[in-house]
Amino acid sequence: MLSRVSFLSSTGRCFLLDQNQSTKGELHLCRTQAEFLHQIDKQGPFAPEPGRYHLYASSSCPWANQCLIVHKLKGLDDIISVSIASPRLTKEGWAFASVDAFPGTDPDPLYNSRYIKDLYHRSHPKFQGRCTVPLLWDKRTQSVVNNDADDIMKIFNFAFNDFLPPHYASANLYPTHLRHEIRRIADWVNESITKAIFKAGFAVSSTVYCSAVIPLFEALDQLEGMLAGKDYLVGNQLTQSDIILYVNMIRFDPIYYHHFKCNMRMIRTGYPNIHTWLRKLYWRIPAFQLTTDFNHIKSGFYLSYDPINNSGIVPMGPVPHIEPL
Ligand SMILES: N[C@@H](CCC(=O)N[C@@H](CS)C(=O)NCC(=O)O)C(=O)O
């Protein structure tokens, strides 16, 4: 049984939760910040160059999923290579296909590593922090560039535009005139939705659970109003806020409703505006559908957190995982 699980901070970042530290239903969390925050720019040691960088990700992890979406939206397939780890988190962390050949899992094409942690240790032999995904890697210096989803999304948005055809180069998920609002909404989503979902999911007392799930559904009610008649959260265009919300909402009915006991309402039956917004992204913009792997998402959540699913059964439903438009 895993004794450590990820948990979210007030800013939406993951914490490490040691199950042995849970007493009386209160969660004691050890915060670990993303340790690697290098940027890719022409002036610094990590210059933008096609073929130089590699993204290690898990399709199950919501934060890695955000980066995979932006990678596709910006057409970076030929510029930044990608490897997907097995969704089944092991005691050694995320594993490659050489350890767990779960369908849709890649080997490490660079070093044939067994685990994501091998890369962290190759880059920083004394590293003792959490070996998380997403992980942006520099093939030239054989080192970690950045392991923060927010940063990586911005790097993908801005840093490689010189190498992209105009329609990809001009795609901007973080336009200057909307930046303040994008950040405000993203912070609200992280705080009121993402954090509440994980707090409810990992609660070990009814008090903690209720203190998360009731405000969560109040926030979803508010979100339902915000999305009335709208295809996008901020302005009239796709932005980083939509991506941060999408990774929560696409997991809601298949995972959070049942596995994390967030079951006061489903998105598909309880929130018509959120449901329409979600289905439009999934069915109309290929970058969303192509990076949403329900098998990885469900296996990742249902098989990685033993304390809340010790049978190891991955439920069949909901059927379908996402409804048609
Ligand atoms: N700093 C990261 C955190 C991402 C994160 O927490 N990833 C989790 C999976 S959702 C992880 O890799 N956990 C592995 C572990 O804790 O061993 C970010 O925000 O991008």
Image: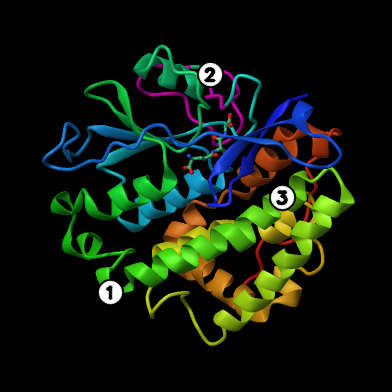
Q: Position of residue 58 (x, y in %)?
A: 52, 38
At mark 3, the secondary structure is helix
- Asked whether mark 3 and ligand 1 are closer than 8 Å, the reply comes as no
Res. 177 mark: 1
Q: Alpha carbon of mark 2 to alpha carbon of mark 1: how far?
A: 46 Å
Q: Identify the main secondary structure in magenta.
A: loop
The kind of secondary structure element at disc 2 is: loop
Left or right of 187 in this view: 76: left
Tally of numbered tags: 3
Amino acid type shown at disc 3:
Lys
Query: Rounded to the nearest whole Å, what is the CA distance between mark 3 and mark 1?
Result: 34 Å
| Residue to which mark 3 is pinned | 199
Q: Which residues are magenta?
A: 94-113
Quadrant where the N terminus sits is top right
Provide residue 17's location: percent of width, then percent of height: 68, 34
- Identified by mark 2, the residue type is Ser
| CB-based contact (under 8 Å), mark 2 and mark 3 | no
Mark 1 Cβ inside 8 Å of ligand 1: no
